[in-house]
Image: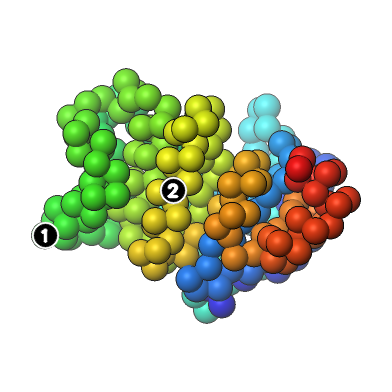
Amino acid sequence: MLLEVSNLTVCYDRAVLINDVSLRVDEGELVSLVGPNGAGKTTVLRAITGLVAWDKMTLKGTSQGDITIKGKVMFDGKDISKTPAHQIVKMGLVHCPERRRPFRELTVKENLMAGAFLHMKKADLQDELDKVFKLFPVLGDRLNQVSGTLSGGEQQMLAVGRALMSRPKLLLIDEPSTGLAPLMRQEVFNKIAEIRSLGITIMLVEQEVASVFSMASRSYVLSTGKIIAQGACDALLEDEMIRKTYLGL
């Protein structure tokens, strides 16, 4: 088992955002986490990857209130529940965030190099860049272009490429189809399937259920912060209540 999340609970002030969520991802799988908008999918990923504070610590902000997190996250046999985010990346658990979030004033190449910042030797950089360009040729064509001027689809490819430069053992991809035209959405999903074929384990968060279920090994359905169903995608689609109420199919 590569990733095991046990009894994850996230509270915002007194409101429970994530309630006792448990899930696992085995090596070589593509597992999806699906559910309606606002279900808490992004919050689960941010908690797993250390982007919010753990246990009884709080993240304070004038407009955000206090966030508390409890539970346990095991990655590659190690408890990473209270591990800083940059250390989690170095271990090989890499988060590709929603809405792409490139460094807009940097070039494509500079964005990709940022993905390799924590661990990669200079001698290895070109080999890793070549792997990304093979997967996403358009990035090689736009190498010196400022990333903020790329199309939405190109920015999504850049975000995934930047994550791949961190050499992930497990790649968490959050809502890659958001804001993309149908043809570009399908292209992005095709690339994600290709990444899996390279041996990279993937956890994919999405609302585009039909596309995700066609390539996922298993899926978890999240609603109002709780896992309300899990299992093989075919079995989930056979449940009429789950299909209509939570999957929109």
The answer to whether the residue labelled 2 contacts the one labelled 1, judged by CB atoms less than 8 Å apart, is: no
Q: Which residue is mark 2?
A: 190
Instruction: Identify the disc placed on residue 55.
Output: none
Amino acid type at circle 1 is: Ala
Q: Which residue is mark 1?
A: 123
In the picture, measured across the screen, residue 112 lies left or right of residue 238, that is left
> Which color scheme does this rendered protein use?
rainbow
Amino acid type at circle 2 is: Asn
Element marked by disc 2: helix
Q: Tell me if mark 1 has few (under 14), some (14-19) or many (20+) residues whose alpha carbon lies within 10 angstroms of its own.
A: few
Residue 89: where, in percent of width, then height? 41, 58
Instruction: Say which residue appears at 37% left-offset and 24% top-offset.
Output: 151
Q: Tell me if mark 2 has few (under 14), some (14-19) or many (20+) residues whose alpha carbon lies within 10 angstroms of its own.
A: few
Task: Give the mark nearest the N terminus, 2 or 1.
Answer: 1
- The C terminus sits in image quarter: top right
In the picture, measured across the screen, residue 112 lies left or right of residue 43, that is left
Residue nearer the viewer, 39 or 36: 36
- The N terminus sits in image quarter: bottom right
Tell me: residue 125, above or below residue 208: below
